[in-house]
């Protein structure tokens, strides 16, 4: 077994600069050692690896905690102060719904959105949905969950598209009496 090469015995052949004394102890061959010899390097390699791993973990943790979990819109980063809860509070009537990649559809009668004191209530034809909402800059978040009744209304397909587009984060913009909620799900236009 001693005549087989080091790699065949499950060992690693490593030549380290400045290790001439170790090499000399092994018949002037490059240093040959297995896993047990690597673990003996505890005084040199293992503490370095522990410190490097700890520093990497700290750097990743700091980087992740510093990043924002809410997307910002281009207008918000351009210096716009955004909306406040008091600006959007009140009852809004849905004017149109435009799903991503589709043309805008006029809203049938009976679709309203009421925002007040962090509470959201929406009437979608013969159904109602309730939940919480927050406004942070230009981001209006409905939910995370909206609780809705599930009666079979005449505009059921439109209602489903509306509640799907409403839930979650949207970029909110206001111009006069028009409130627009835009997201990757679609665009909702409301009027007062």
Image (cartoon, rainbow, N blue to C red):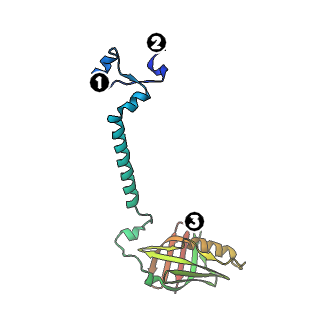
The Cα–Cα distance between marks 3 and 1, rounded to whole angstroms, is 67 Å
Of residues 48 and 63, the one drawn nearer to the viewer in this rendering? 48
Residue marked by disc 2: 3
Q: Where is residue 65 in the image (x, y as percent from the top left)?
A: 39, 60
Q: What residue is shown at x 39% (from left), y 55% (from top)? A: 61
Up/down of 88 relative to 14, above or below: below
Residue at 36 percent across and 40 percent down: it is 49
Q: Which of marks 3 and 2 is nearer the N terminus?
A: 2
Question: Measured from the top left, where is residue 78 in percent x and y?
Answer: 35, 69
Left or right side of 1 for 29: left
Using a 10 Å C-alpha cutoff, classify the residue at mark 3 as few (fewer than 14 neighbours), some (14 to 19) or many (20 or more).
few
Q: Name the residue under label 1.
A: 19
Q: Which of marks 1 and 2 is nearer the N terminus?
A: 2
Question: Which circle, 3 or 2, is nearer the viewer?
Answer: 2
- Marks 3/1 in contact by CB < 8 Å: the verdict is no
* Mark linked to residue 101: 3
Badge 1: residue crowd in 10 Å (few <14, some 14–19, many ≥20): few
Asked whether residue 56 is in view, the answer is yes
Q: In which quarter of the image is residue 38?
A: top left
Give the image quarter of residue 29: top left
| SS for dot 1 | loop
Query: How much space separates mark 1 and mark 2, taking CA atoms?
Result: 24 Å
The kind of secondary structure element at disc 3 is loop
Mark 3 / mark 1, whichever is N-terminal: 1
Quarter location, residue 94: bottom right
């Amino acid at each position: 077994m001693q005549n087989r090469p080091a790699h065949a015995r499950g060992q690693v052949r490593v030549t380290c600069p400045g290790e001439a004394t170790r090499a000399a102890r092994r018949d002037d061959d490059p240093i040959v050692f297995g896993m047990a010899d690597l673990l003996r390097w505890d005084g040199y390699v293992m503490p370095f690896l522990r410190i490097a791993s700890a520093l990497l973990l700290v750097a990743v943790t700091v980087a992740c905690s510093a990043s924002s979990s809410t997307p910002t819109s281009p207008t918000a980063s351009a210096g716009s102060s955004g909306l406040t809860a008091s600006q959007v509070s009140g009852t809004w009537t849905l004017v149109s719904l435009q799903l991503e990649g589709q043309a805008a559809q006029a809203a049938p009668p009976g679709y309203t959105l009421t925002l007040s004191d962090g509470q959201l209530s929406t009437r979608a034809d013969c159904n109602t949905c309730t939940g919480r909402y927050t406004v942070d800059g230009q981001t209006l978040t409905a939910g995370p969950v909206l609780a809705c009744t599930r009666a079979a209304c005449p505009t059921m397909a439109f209602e489903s598209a509306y509640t799907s587009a409403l839930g979650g984060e949207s970029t909110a913009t206001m111009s006069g009496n028009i409130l627009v909620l835009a997201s990757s799900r679609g665009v909702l236009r409301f009027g007062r």
